[in-house]
Structures are given as structure tokens and as C-alpha cells.
Amino acid sequence: MSPDGDDSAPTGPVPVLAVVGRPNVGKSTLVNRILGRREAVVQDVPGVTRDRVSYDAEWSGRAFTLVDTGGWDPDARGLAERIAAQAEIAVSLADAVLFVVDAKVGITDADEGVVKILRRAGKPVVLAANKVDDERAEAEAYGLWNLGLGEPFPVSALHGRGSGDLLDAVLAALPETPAFTEGEEVGGPRRIALVGKPNVGKSSLLNKLAGAERVVVDNVAGTTVDPVDELIVLGGRPWRFIDTAGIRKRVKEASGHEYYASLRTSTAIDRAEVAVLVLDGGQPISEQDIRILQTVREAGRALVIAFNKWDLVDEERRWQLDREIERELVQVQWAPRINITARTGWHVDRLVPALDRALEGWETRIGTGALNTFLGRLVAEHPHPVRGGKQPKILFGTQPSTAPPTFILFTSGRLDASYERFIERRLREQFGFVGTPIVLQQRVREKRKR
């Protein structure tokens, strides 16, 4: 995925490189070095990367997919064990493996355990001896010949030292791929960002849709740190899901990797066409939920609201929730709402029709003639109130763009905000616009001075 979110990609299959290694050897720093941008979450704490996360990369005119995995400890238990399982899956799907070892620490039992698994997988392996910041450290790197994986490539992921030679070796290990052409447009699947507070069930929903344990799920809030792009076929069509880190309270309150994760959630919303806000049906709608809604609206994205964990919602909670929806979601009454239970898959099939409706609304265009007929009738029936002896009039309207639908109103004076809201409400009644924000801009005609 390119940093600005367009789906420029080479045609044909792109080879896959899995980046593995035990925790905290600098895999994510190396991934960022290869990509030439800060994508992977980096923090000096083992286990920050928990899922396998894919990025589109390119070197010497050849494209490949880079899969960053969580720290791989063969003796792991609990959540760490599931992260290790994700790394094994990544290796099984990859064409080649980049095995990262900390040259300063040397060979550990965990490294040798990883080597055994790599040998069983039978994939080509490129060995990166990381944290070699100067020539003195290079001698330590050559001790890694003892792993039996061939020549170790000394690199400094932090400073970029040796990364070119390493990437040349990576390309030699990967199968050939069609030449990478910059900016080649490919019509891709619709892009969906799963957003919401930590621990509302976004990863469970993604797993249920994918029909596989694709994302590490743990009932610890904030388990997902990187957004994980997942191509999933639903209703006979592919969709690209962007699973996002749970948005924390406020960016400035968030600690290191949470800070980057919250930034990345905004990026995921920007990259998406439609956002699915996942709410916990059993919990009151919070200030955090409203803030996420605001982010989606300000980004001008289509919106679907999914109330998850519906199996835990009793009659009393439903009554309370109806009141909360009226009070808290008044600004987004236009968004389709579905009730689901991601854990069991109950009503998850309702997501596709809701997404289709939201995207259709997001891309609705009204012809200039129809729009001005509508505006003329609206102004005749409900003229703008007189303010200070003046009554602003709508002279003409046009819709220059969709996604989101954007209207320019040419007026004889500034319209009240309440009248703008009234116009938006009537536009929705007349033309639908389900699931999308509407942007109204005013152009006030200046009176000519005599």
C-alpha cells in the first residue's frame, strides 16, 4: 500500500517476504528502513508488533510484499504463543524469509529454535545481522555463520548501514515478478476501515468475516497495534478491510506505540472509503465513540455503525440504547445501523447490504437541473427567516463532486447554520444520501457598489 493510500500495484502475483525473528531484534525498524517511511510501529519494548502486517515494498524496480511478524519465541505461552503461530503462518505463505538476529547478542536458544522451524518450512532464508553500527561489530556478525543459514548480512536498521546489500540478497531469494511501474492504476476492491474503541470486538469481527484466525485477538484492550489490511470475499466480491488499532482517548495522552497507532487509525480512515464504527452494545455510548464519529465525518467518509455483542444486550439495555442513539448519534442519523454478534457470526451477513447502501449514498450525484428545481420549491415553501431587515436567498446550486456529496449554494447573503441543516435534512429526504456526510458550501454574491 502506498503511503497516500492509492492502490497502485504491479499486475500479476507479487512475491511475499516474511520478516521473522525473536522479540526486540529490530524487525519493525528494519521494515521501516526497507519501506523508506515510518509504517511499522516501533518501540523499545518487546512484542509491540502482534499481528502479521503486510506492506507493499519496492527495490531496484521490483515490487514485493513485506510481511512484518510479531516477535517469534518458539517456547512462547498465551498471547505470545498465538503471536508465534501468526509468524509460522506468515512463513508458510511467504516465498522467502528475512530472518533478523541481534548481532550484539549473538545466537540464542530462541534463534536456534526459529532456525529449526525455518528449515522445516523449506523456504529460502536471508539472514540479517542487525545492530551492526560500525566495522568493529561486523566481526561479531560473522559468528552467525554457525546458524547454518549461509552468509549473514550485517546491517544497521537504525542507520541504514548495509541495507542495500541486504535488499539485493532478498531480491535474489525471491521469485521473479513483473516489472514495477510507478503510478500504475488498478481498480481495487472497496476499502473499509474498522474503527472503534479498544476491546469492542473489531478483530473478532474481522476474523469472523475472514473465516480464519487472521488477527491476534486477546481480551486485553489494545491488542491490535498495527492496522492489518485483509482482502475478504463477501457477497461474491472482494473487499479490503483495514483493521485499526483501538483509538485511545486523546493522541497527546497516549504513550509511545499507542500514539503512532492512533495516528495510524486516522490514516486508515483517510485511506478507506467507508468506516464501520464498532460499538459495544452492552456499554453506554461514550465521549470516545463520539470523537471517532467526528473523525470519520471530518474525513468525509461513508459510515456504518455496528452494535456488537448484541447477545449480551437485554430489554432494559435496549431501552437505554434507544435513548442514547437519539441523544448521542443525532448528528449521524443518516448512518445505517446493524446489530451483530461477531463472536458467533449472528447477523454479520447484514454488513454487506449496509456497506453497499452507504457507498451508494456516498457516490450519489444530483443533476444541476434537478437540484435547482428542488431548491426553488424548498425556498418557496420555507423561505429563510428575515434577519436585520434582510432575507438571504438561494440563487443557484450545484454539486461539483461526490464521495462525499459536496454542494455549492450561491446566495444573496449568509444563510443561518440552522437553515443549512434544514436544507441538508430535506436533501436526504428527497435524494437518500444514506450513510454519507453531506458538505454544504456557501458562496455569497457581493453587492456591486454603484
Image (cartoon, rainbow, N blue to C red):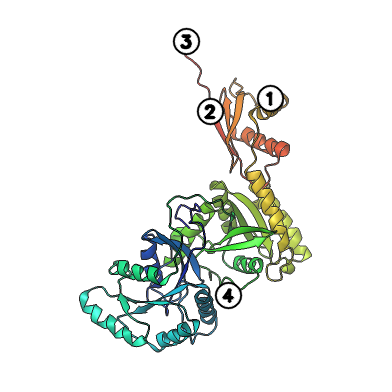
Q: Is residue 286 visible?
A: no
Q: Which mark is residue 376?
A: 1
Residue at image location 37% in from the left, 64% down from the top = 34
C-alpha distance separating marks 1 and 4:
56 Å
C-alpha distance separating marks 3 and 2:
21 Å
The correct choice, above or below, for 253 with respect to 449 in the image is: below
Q: Which numbered disc, 1 or 2, marks the residue that appears first in the sequence?
A: 1
Q: Which mark is residue 218?
A: 4
Few, some or many residues within 10 Å of mark 4 (<14, 14–19, 20+): some
Residue that protrudes farthest toward the top in the picture: 450
Image location (x, y in percent) of residue 366: 65, 34
Q: Which mark is residue 98?
A: none
Image quadrant of residue 400?
top right
Q: Which numbered disc, 4 or 2, marks the residue that appears first in the sequence?
A: 4
- The residue indicated by pointer 2 is 443
The correct choice, above or below, for 335 with respect to 75 in the image is: above
| Amino acid type of the residue that numbered disc 1 sits on in the rendered structure | Gly
C-alpha distance separating marks 1 and 3:
29 Å
